[in-house]
């Protein structure tokens, strides 16, 4: 690889803003906020990035899907445009 052309890839803690769940992964993101994280080698300090949605709160992963009222949408369409044939 060429030197000095790749972004810094380092450990970062991400926190879900709605559930508060946190996980440690690697990323190129940076933050001025930090957090103490327990590791097998002791307590380490990592950048903390707060995100709105993670797999802990996303409806696809939690199973809390929104149910769409498709019958109501069809009735609304027929009221607006009638049964034109």
Image (cartoon, rainbow, N blue to C red):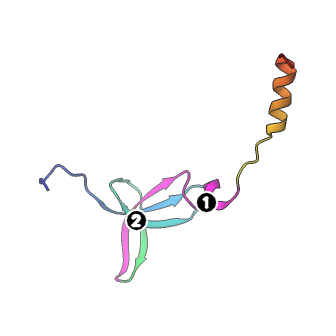
Q: Residue at x 73, y 48 (%)?
A: 66
Q: Horizontal and vertical percent for residue 5?
A: 17, 49
Residue with the mark numbered 1: 61
Find numbered disc 1 in the image and state the secondary structure of the residue it sits on: helix
Residue with the mark numbered 2: 25
The quarter holding residue 33 reads: bottom left
Q: Residue at x 60, y 55 (%)?
A: 58
Q: Report the front residue among 66 and 13.
A: 66
Foreground label between 1 and 2: 1
Of the two numbered discs 1 and 2 on the same chain, state the one appearing first in sequence. 2
Q: Tell me, yes or no, whether the two marked residues, 1 and 2, touch with CB atoms within 8 Å.
A: no
Q: Horizontal and vertical percent for residue 73?
A: 80, 32
Find numbered disc 2 in the image and state the secondary structure of the residue it sits on: strand
Q: Report the front residue among 11 and 60.
A: 60
- Is 7 contained in the magenta span? no
- Which quadrant of the figure contains the C terminus? top right
Dot 2 surroundings within 10 Å: few (below 14), some, or many (20 or more)?
few
- Which quadrant of the figure contains the N terminus? bottom left
Which mark is on residue 22?
A: none
Magenta stretch bounds: 41-64
> Is residue 69 found left or right of 34 in the rendered image?
right
Q: Horizontal and vertical percent for residue 79?
A: 87, 22
> Distance of mark 1 from mark 2, alpha carbons?
19 Å
Q: Horizontal and vertical percent for residue 56?
A: 59, 62
Q: Residue at x 12, y 53 (%)?
A: 2
- Is 49 contained in the magenta span? yes
26 w.r.t. 68: above or below: below
Q: Report the front residue among 63 and 41.
A: 63
Q: Report the front residue among 42 and 85.
A: 85
> Is residue 82 found left or right of 11 in the rendered image?
right
Q: Residue at x 84, y 37 (%)?
A: 71
The quarter holding residue 54 reads: bottom right
């Amino acid at each position: 690889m060429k030197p000095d052309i790749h972004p810094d890839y380092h450990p970062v803690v991400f926190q879900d803003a709605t559930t508060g769940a946190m996980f440690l992964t690697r990323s190129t993101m940076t933050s001025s906020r930090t957090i103490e994280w327990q590791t097998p080698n002791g307590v380490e300090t990592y950048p903390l990035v707060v995100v709105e949605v993670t797999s802990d709160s996303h409806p696809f992963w939690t199973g809390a899907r929104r149910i769409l009222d498709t019958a109501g949408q069809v009735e609304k369409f027929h009221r607006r445009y009638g049964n034109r044939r």
